[in-house]
Image: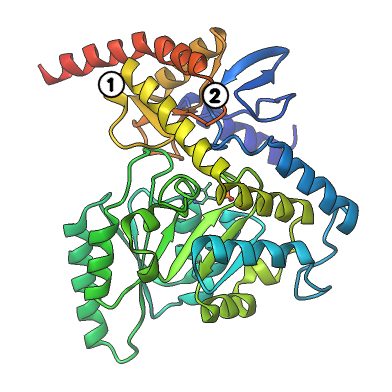
Amino acid sequence: MSAFDQELTARLDGIREQGLLRELRRVDSAQGPRIEIGGRTLLNFSSNDYLGLANHPALKEAAIRAVEKFGAGAGASRLICGSLAPFHELEEALATFKGTEAALSFSTGYAAAVGTITALLGKDDIIIVDKLVHACIVDAAKLSGAKLRVFAHNDLNDLKDILKWADTRNRESTNKGNILIITESVFSMDGDRAPLEQLVALKEAYGAWLMLDEAHATGLYGVNRRGLAEECGVSDTVEIQMGTLGKALGASGGYICGSRALIDVLVNRARSFIFSTAPVPAAAAAASAAIDILQQAEGDSLRRNLWELLKTFSKINPALLWFPSAIQPLKIGDEAQAVSVASELRERGFFVPAIRYPTVARGSARLRITLTASHSEDQVIAIGNALSPVCEKLRQLSGLRDA
Ligand SMILES: *Cc1c(COP(=O)(O)O)cnc(C)c1O
């Protein structure tokens, strides 16, 4: 073995010893309530395809039509070889859907975060993030060179203290920087929500900007299913609305919605947009078809399905539901134990991921159960019942700890 591979093998051993080794599991079917893994069909409770659109005929057809007209690949970055029509149609649809002046699509949500944050902030600025924001936001904030501060999860007092500090620092400094607060509306691994109304009040009071990542809320909340900002009536005060096209929208890509000025700056300054080949046109066309469905009666009925299934699920395990979200975490703590529960469930025909460090903090491993509109009531009852003994055991353990 080469010295290089020896070193890497030692690193892998270290990861394995901590119960943190990850391996890819090949799936031989489309995403849906049932997936095929290793020759077995499992009930799938792992996907972020919350409305069941990833395998929807309208999205597939839109993708196929886009391939036939525009080909498989985009050829270059959109500023180099021209910008294909499906991206423009998508961005118009996104802006209308979200009720903003303009929108820009990126190859992924990750690229949207990295491109946007580094385009807007630099070393004189301050970025303040919730402790539980997604890795792409943390990476982007670090890359930007801005001063990064973290507030305790959903803790408005902590946020206020940091805003006071930032305000004082700005007053005392000659080059006054901008302050950007970033949070998620619904948190990816906890399924809880941010206190958006109070957060907006705070950021207004301190003249900070707000970037809101609606990755797990777009399509699910608000009268028009725009997201939690709509439900809370604060959309107009959020400077930067971010999301992904790969979760409830069933396709692939990321987006930023906001003012025309914001989008124009991003086209000129977002490096992940400028220096990267445009996504395949099929992805944009599929996402446009998803936005179309969301805005129609079908979108409403899919969402209602999901909340009905959630009710069924929470009746079986009442401790699990505290905010209506498609993400239901079952916290186990120990990494190896979480993996072993997930593997037991797999044996019994359920595919539920064990989420571990570095996705969540060490010692807070969990099962992350996601429900989608395309599950049947029977399937949800089945996973609810399969989890009951796990819940019971956890209750006993926490009772022992409390005593
Ligand atoms: C998934 C996710 C992203 C990244 O989006 P991709 O399109 O998957 O790159 C960003 N933020 C949050 C909160 C996410 O859960």
User: Residue type at mark 1?
Assistant: Pro
Residue 222 coordinates in the image, percent (x, y): 40, 51
Q: Which mark is residue 318?
A: 1
Residue 367 visible in this rendered orientation of the protein: no
Quadrant position of the N terminus in the picture: top right
Q: Which of 290 and 17 is in front in this view?
A: 290
Residue 92 coordinates in the image, percent (x, y): 63, 67
Label 1: which secondary element: helix
Q: Mark 2 points at which residue?
A: 375
Residue 92 visible in this rendered orientation of the protein: yes
Residue extending furthest toward the front: 297
Residue at 57% across, 35% down: 11
Q: How crowded is mark 1: few (under 14 residues within 10 Å), some or many (20 or more)?
A: few
Q: Which of 38 and 165 is in front in this view?
A: 38
User: Residue type at mark 2?
Assistant: His
Report the side of 202 relative to 320 (left or right): left
